[in-house]
Image: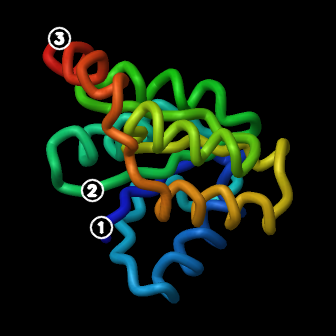
Amino acid sequence: MKIAIASDHAGYTYKTMLALWLRDRGHEVVDYGTDSEQSVDYPDFIRPAAEAVASGTCERGIVLGGSGNGEAMVANRVSGVRCALCWNVESARLGRGHNDANMISLGERMVTEDIARAIVEAWLESPFDGGRHARRIAKIDSR
């Protein structure tokens, strides 16, 4: 799978760790930055990753920050993106299963490295259930 990844300075360490972890599992990872822990304006990096997912350049996307809140907000401003803020495995499963989340946002200050990997794994492996939520998601995407 081709996965976009981006972070601000507060999510840089986990972004780097997750990109390597995903590549080790055979995924193609496109890194939209940032490239250090120096303070940056996160929309400069998050929006291009979200646009890559929305355009189909990447199949899915992961964005990271200190809490993940701002990153999720920026990603969700891009039409066609459904970014779930995930702080545990269950939120990742539900975001994917019920909401067809094509992106997730993680907070480096909110979860351990092991939990971050488990969240990503659950999100990648969970199918969209396509049930009653599918019509609502299609309606949102058509806006």
Q: Amino acid at mark 2?
A: Glu
Q: Residue at x 38, y 38 (%)?
A: 100
What residue sits right under mark 2 in the picture?
59
SS under mark 2: loop
Q: Amino acid at mark 3?
A: Arg
SS under mark 3: loop
Query: CA–CA distance between discs 1 and 2?
Result: 5 Å
What residue sits right under mark 3 in the picture?
143
Q: Is residue 26 visible?
A: yes
Quarter that holds the C terminus: top left
Q: Position of residue 104 (x, y in %)?
A: 52, 43
Q: Residue at x 69, y 45 (%)?
A: 90
Q: Amino acid at mark 1?
A: Lys
Badge 1 or badge 2: first in the primary sequence:
1
Q: Residue at x 27, y 46 (%)?
A: 53
Query: Could you say which disc has been placed on residue 98 in the image?
Result: none
- Crowding near the residue tagged with mark 3, few <14, some 14–19, many ≥20 C-alpha atoms within 10 Å: few
What residue sits right under mark 1 in the picture?
2
